[in-house]
Image (tube, grey):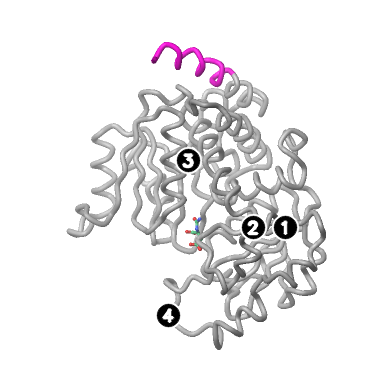
Amino acid sequence: MPLFPGGNPRTSGHLISAADLTRDDAVRILDTAEEMARLADRPIKKLPALRGRTIVNLFFEDSTRTRISFEAAEKRLSADVINFAAKGSSVSKGESLKDTAQTLEAMGVDAVVIRHGASGAPYRLATSGWIDAAVVNAGDGTHQHPTQALLDAFTMRRRLIGPDAGLGRDLAGRRITIVGDILHSRVARSNVDLLNTLGAQVTLVAPPTLLPVGVEGWPCEVSYDLDAVLPKSDAVMMLRVQRERMNAAFFPTEREYSRRYGLDVQRMERMPEHAVVMHPGPMVRGMEITAEVADSGRCTVTEQVANGVSIRMAVLYLLLGGSEHAGGSGNTATGTAETAATTGTAARTEEK
Ligand code: NCD
């Protein structure tokens, strides 16, 4: 019986929403990702854990880092990888998600990583009975992007507590500020859910037009004054204004937006010395973040990309390779990753 994620029986065995993760699930993923990150320091960055398993990356929406990151994670775990981009496929001939899914099922895939413009598409795929494969949501509409929230939490735990000191720990009491286009952001929604589960206090800062209806019911604070919130933040996450999802004018001009909600060096100096600047990418330099801030040592954007590979390895490992251990303690999963790392060395020698 798959017990991961543990917070929602309907989607257990899949990763659809950050809200489905219990605190223990989340900490187990972060700890497993620490084990996976150690691999990145080795000359041969490969484990045999998912050898013989097939994973399809089903991308119906544009993506650079998420798609590459999943692919790198799958290859590092020795899975067979099939990349599917909707452009150039039968989807442009009108094929439905159901038919695409059943085609993949007929090919015997073990996991489907899906990015889709429609909120809810990964949930539908996981719960419809169309396929048996594990489904991992790589971003659906304005709904969820759980592996992004996990890699953000991993980056914060490393920076604010430390890679070793952070093991087994959550983000209790840390103050995280998320700034920008909350309305259209699946990254913001996933982060609010996960950070709340991990015990952090979240504040959203945005123009009123870029906050969703019902935000007062979310487990976070809301502010319109970035300068007032910065000194009380341990991490500040800047979001891109998602023009592709906008059908109206949400603010007067780009200049006005940057002046009130953009992060420049003067603003960054209001943050406590230990605080970090985060961004999921892609950044629009000069809009939500200036080039100086983006290139400063306090900005974790490239670290987030590197950490994304470790997080996706951990998720796929726990869903596919380590599922029989998922019911055990976090240590069991981590221990298994360690064992896999050791076996990896043996397998590599054998492969030469
Ligand atoms: C984000 C996304 O696609 O949701 N990017 C990402 O996955 N790294 C955010 C964005 O597009 O602005």
Q: Residue at x 41, y 27 (%)?
A: 78
Chain-order first, disc 4 or disc 3: 3
At label 1, counting other C-alpha atoms closer than 10 Å, the crowd grade (few under 14, some 14-19, many 20 or more) is: many
Whether residues under marks 1 and 2 lie with C-beta atoms below 8 angstroms apart, the answer is yes
**Which secondary structure dominates the residues rendered in magenta?**
helix
| Residue 305 % position (x, y) | 54, 48
Q: Which residue position holds label 2?
A: 278
Determine whether the residue tagged by mark 1 lies in a helix, strand or loop. Answer: strand
Q: CA distance from mark 2 to mark 3?
A: 27 Å
- Which-is-in-front pick, marks 1 and 4? 1
Q: Tell me which residue sits at (56%, 16%) in the image.
A: 342
Q: Residues in magenta?
A: 339-352
Who comes first in sequence, dot 2 or dot 3?
A: 3
Task: Name the residue carrying label 4.
Answer: 247
Figure quadrant of the C terminus:
top left
Verify CB contact (< 8 Å) between mark 4 and mark 2: no
Asked if residue 42 lies left or right of residue 117, the reply is right
Q: Is residue 128 above or below residue 225?
A: above
Q: Which mark is residue 235?
A: 1
Q: Badges 1 and 4: C-beta atoms under 8 Å apart? A: no
Residue 22 % position (x, y)? 64, 42
Label 4 vs label 3, nearer the camera: 4
Residue, disc 3: 14
**Of the pair 311 and 217, the residue shown nearer to us:** 311
Tell me the kind of residue under disc 3. His
Give whichever of discs 1 and 3 has the lower sequence position. Answer: 3
Q: Earlier in the sequence, mark 4 or mark 2?
A: 4
What amino acid type should be assigned to the residue bearing mark 4?
Asn
10 Å crowding of disc 2: few (<14), some (14-19), many (20+): many
